[in-house]
Amino acid sequence: MDIGTLRDQLDVIDGQLIELLEKRMELCKQIGYEKKKISKSVYDKAREEEKLDSVQKSVKNQEYSEALRGVFSCIMDESKKIQNRIM
């Protein structure tokens, strides 16, 4: 397969990721409003560690487990920023 075809496949996947990440961010925003109602902190260390561990264990190709843990850590950092704007 040539590089152009491979990049086209990446472009399709990137589009799917963007759509899913937008949905995720909207849910995080809604969670932020719920946290505000009950005066709950944005940062929940136990939940974050639980989620990151779950992501790492769910990766089929363990060669990518650390990288994907890092990606999800960044996603959660951005989610916390969205929630902090609500507070």
Image: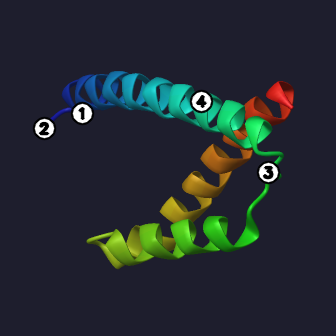
Front in this rendered view, residue 38 or 50: 38
Amino acid type, residue under disc 1 in the picture: Leu
Instruction: Tell us which disc is closer to us: 1 or 2.
Output: 1
Q: Is residue 73 left or right of residue 44?
A: left
Q: In the image, residue 73 lies at what x, y percent?
A: 64, 57
The numbered mark, 4 or 1, whose residue comes first in the sequence reads: 1
Q: CA distance from mark 2 to mark 4?
A: 43 Å
Q: CA distance from mark 3 to mark 2?
A: 51 Å
In what element is the residue under mark 3?
Answer: loop
Front in this rendered view, residue 5 or 40: 40
Q: Which quarter of the picture shows residue 26?
A: top right
Q: Residues within 10 Å of mark 1 (few under 14, many from 20)?
A: few
Write down the residue under mark 4: 30
Q: In the image, residue 17 lies at what x, y percent?
A: 39, 32
| Disc number placed over residue 1 in the picture, else none | 2
Q: In the image, residue 54 lies at what x, y percent?
A: 44, 72
Write down the residue under mark 3: 40
Q: Is residue 46 left or right of residue 72?
A: right
75 vs 8: above or below: below
Contact (Cβ within 8 Å) of mark 1 with mark 2 = yes
Q: Residues within 10 Å of mark 3 (few under 14, many from 20)?
A: few
Instruction: Tell us which disc is closer to us: 3 or 1.
Output: 3
Q: CA distance from mark 4 to mark 3?
A: 13 Å
Instruction: Tell us which disc is closer to us: 4 or 1.
Output: 4
Q: Residues within 10 Å of mark 4 (few under 14, many from 20)?
A: some
Q: Residue at coordinates 26% horizontally, 71% vertically from top-left?
A: 60
Amino acid type, residue under disc 3 in the picture: Lys
